[in-house]
Amino acid sequence: MQHFWLRHEVKEGEGRSPLLPTHAAALIQKGHKVSVERSATRCVADALYEEAGAQLVETGSWVNAPKDAVILGLKELPESNDALVHNHIFFAHCFKGQGGSAELLNRFKSGGGTLWDLEFLTLDNGRRVAAFGRAAGIAGMAVGLLVWAYKQLDPLSVSPCPPLVERFQNYDELATYVKQFLDKAKEKSGKLPTVIVIGALGRCGGGSVDFAEKVGITPTKWDLDETKKGGPFPEILQHDIFVNCIYLMTKIPPFVTSEGIAGPGRVLSVIADVSCDTSNPNNPIPVYNQTTTFLKPTLRATQGDNPLDVIAIDHLPSLVPAESSKEFDDALIEHLLAYPNTPVWTRAKDLFHQKTKEVLG
Ligand SMILES: NC(=O)c1ccc[n+]([C@@H]2O[C@H](COP(=O)([O-])OP(=O)(O)OC[C@H]3O[C@@H](n4cnc5c(N)ncnc54)[C@H](O)[C@@H]3O)[C@@H](O)[C@H]2O)c1
């Protein structure tokens, strides 16, 4: 019997959940215990978990959960230096040298806790067990198109995209919303944007391409074949919007550079960096160094009369929290039911120990 403890997400704008009430009920039916922290921001009402048989507990109380509880979440833990004593399942973003990696791994090491990173739960064939990629690609394309449209409608605005406070029930509703702005922008500027997606054959890239097509745009699609000659790529600068969806594994030549974007003749007006390797030392878009949020979706990479705006939101799927959570939870549940003694969990645990050793010695 396991005790799963679904924590409230502290990240601003995060509304997704890795476990929905129907599958909380499935865990309980198998004899597991499920505690769910009350959360005013989760896309599912607390009461639905209670109806499913879960025990509701106070927001943020996982720190005092019984030591054998398995703390389930999505994004980062609240900021703290405290030792981590529990078993945790979440996207920790600390195995690729990202900022703060050593500190987080050190918290696990000193508390004796274990991390199963959701990004590294893989099947025997190497495929990810569950991913938000498709939803991220859809949302990244949607925000990229919105920002481009806002820029046509108000070219002098220093902050082209207002806070995106609205959340959408599903991808169709999001497409209808974006299409309205594109239509208005087209009326004013006389055109729809040209778009290039890199990493187009992946999960995020596929979502991006599909969403663009849904709103009437056929993007240029690049993947490994097209980038093998090595960047920077002048072709990117000749599209209105660049949506980056690659899975970065090693150092590669940059796709765009500060010198390139400062040069004459640039068409590029918006970069939607879905991959969001902002704090990765090998980020192939080294023209910005901060993430953005739904409350302030863009940062300006170049000023002047042809500004370039970058979107680097690292929790894009929460624009459509219910549909993206359902896709993720549907894929994860069979593995949660089998936790922790299958190769999926063992591999991820081994990787955690290997990375901890590499980083901390
Ligand atoms: N911003 C967010 O909210 C968010 C959410 C989910 C995933 N992501 C990130 O998006 C990235 C992609 O995830 P995914 O699930 O789509 O991965 P994936 O493995 O399904 O797809 C990645 C694609 O990138 C291609 N690729 C890799 N290197 C390339 C290169 N140098 N040039 C051209 N193409 C290249 C691959 O061939 C593949 O088709 C990951 O870094 C992931 O962490 C971000």
Image (cartoon, rainbow, N blue to C red):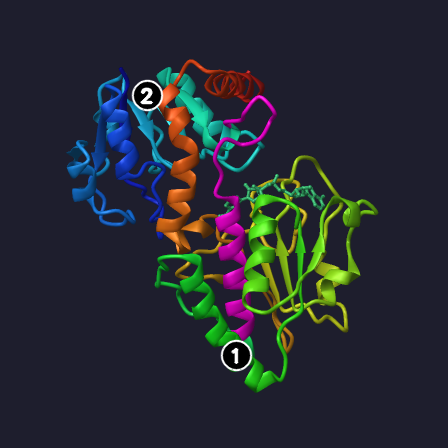
The residue where tag 2 is placed is 86
Q: Which residue shows up at 42% across the image and 39% down it?
A: 328
Residue farthest to the right, as pictured: 229
Q: Which residue shows up at 49% across the image and 56% down it?
A: 139
Q: Is residue 239 magenta-colored?
A: no
Q: Is residue 138 magenta-colored?
A: yes
Secondary-structure class at tag 2: loop
Query: Which quarter of the rendering shows the C terminus?
Result: top right
Three-letter residue code for mark 1: Asp
- In the picture, the disc for residue 254 is none
Point out residue 232 in the picture as x, y percentages from the top left corner: 77, 54
In the figure, 149 relative to 61: above or below? below
Point out residue 352 in the picture as x, y percentages from the top left corner: 50, 21
Q: Is mark 1 within 8 Å of ligand 1?
A: no
Left of 253 or right of it: where is 130?
Answer: left
Magenta span: 121-149
Three-letter residue code for mark 2: His
Point out residue 78 in the picture as x, y percentages from the top left corner: 33, 38
In the figure, 313 relative to 172: above or below? above
Secondary-structure class at tag 1: helix
Mark 2: give few (<14), some (14-19) or many (20+) Cα within 10 Å.
many
Query: Which quarter of the rendering shows the N terminus?
Result: top left
The residue where tag 1 is placed is 183
